[in-house]
Amino acid sequence: MAICHAAYVSRGPQKVFCEAVPQASENFLALCASGYYDGCKFHRNIKGFMTQTGDPTGSGKGGQSIYGEPYPDEIRSTLKFNGRGLVAFANSGSDSNRSQFFITYGATPHLNTKYTIFGRVIDGAENGTLDAIERVPSGTQKEGFRPKHDIILKSTTIHSNPIAMKIVKDNYV
């Protein structure tokens, strides 16, 4: 995933938990493959908590899943909000996942059982990309914590897609 902030581009590869949360993983990987996230702004940024993107309108109110409607949560007891760089789908309540997702800046145990964790940033979480995003000044809560400078998800690249490989294997081998 390439993220463009101000005048530089950084990479923040992430691992997707395909076996643990297959529906969320399929949604994320398909949206990435289609270019859906390319150019999306990070519309919410709360230092010490998280940053959020995945809405092509940039308003924080848009976004669609590949299923054409919200899909159910995939809460797993083995996946906890226990550190920096966890990636989860944002929602407006139970079973309302679409395309928006957030990345944590630290442990956020109060989010456990409320959001589907589907990945972890594996490069750039401790220093680099995520640190740079966290440092971007944001508005107040009343202003929706909107970043004062654009942070843009420039593009996504899938290096390995176990879901697509399984489909090919199941149907053609």
Image (cartoon, rainbow, N blue to C red):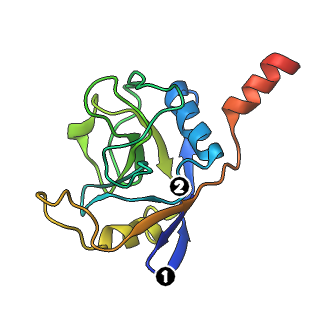
Instruction: Give amino acid for label 2.
Output: Ile
Rendered location of residue 109, percent (x, y): 24, 40
Which residue is at a point 28% across and 24% down the rendered structure image? 94
Other-residue count near label 2 (Cα within 10 Å), few / some / many at <14 / 14–19 / ≥20 = some
Residue 44 picture quarter: bottom left
Q: In the rendered view, does 145 fall on the left or right side of 169?
A: left
Quadrant in which the N terminus is drawn: bottom right
Residue 147 vs residue 118, the one in the foreground: 147
Check disc 2 and report its element: helix, strand or loop: loop
Q: Which mark is residue 134?
A: none
Identify the image quadrant of the C terminus.
top right
Tell me the number on the disc at residue 7: 1
In this orientation, which residue lies closer to the viewer: 126 or 3? Answer: 3
Residue 77 lies, with reference to residue 85, above or below; the image says: above
Amino acid carrying label 1: it is Ala
- Residue 30 visible from this viewpoint: yes
Q: Nearer the viewer, mark 1 or mark 2?
A: 1
Q: Are marks 1 and 2 in contact (CB under 8 Å)?
A: no
* Residue 35 against residue 132 in the figure, above or below: above
Which residue in the structure is indicated by mark 2? 122
Give the mark nearer the N terminus: 1 vs 2: 1
Alpha-carbon span between mark 1 and mark 2: 23 Å
Of the pair 38 and 137, the residue shown nearer to us = 38
Residue 11 position in % (x across, y down) = 56, 66
The count of marks equals 2
| Residue closest to the far left | 142
Residue 19 at what x, y percent from top left? Answer: 58, 27
Q: Is residue 76 above or below residue 145?
A: above
Q: Quadrant of residue 9?
A: bottom right
Q: Residue at x 72, y 31 (%)?
A: 164
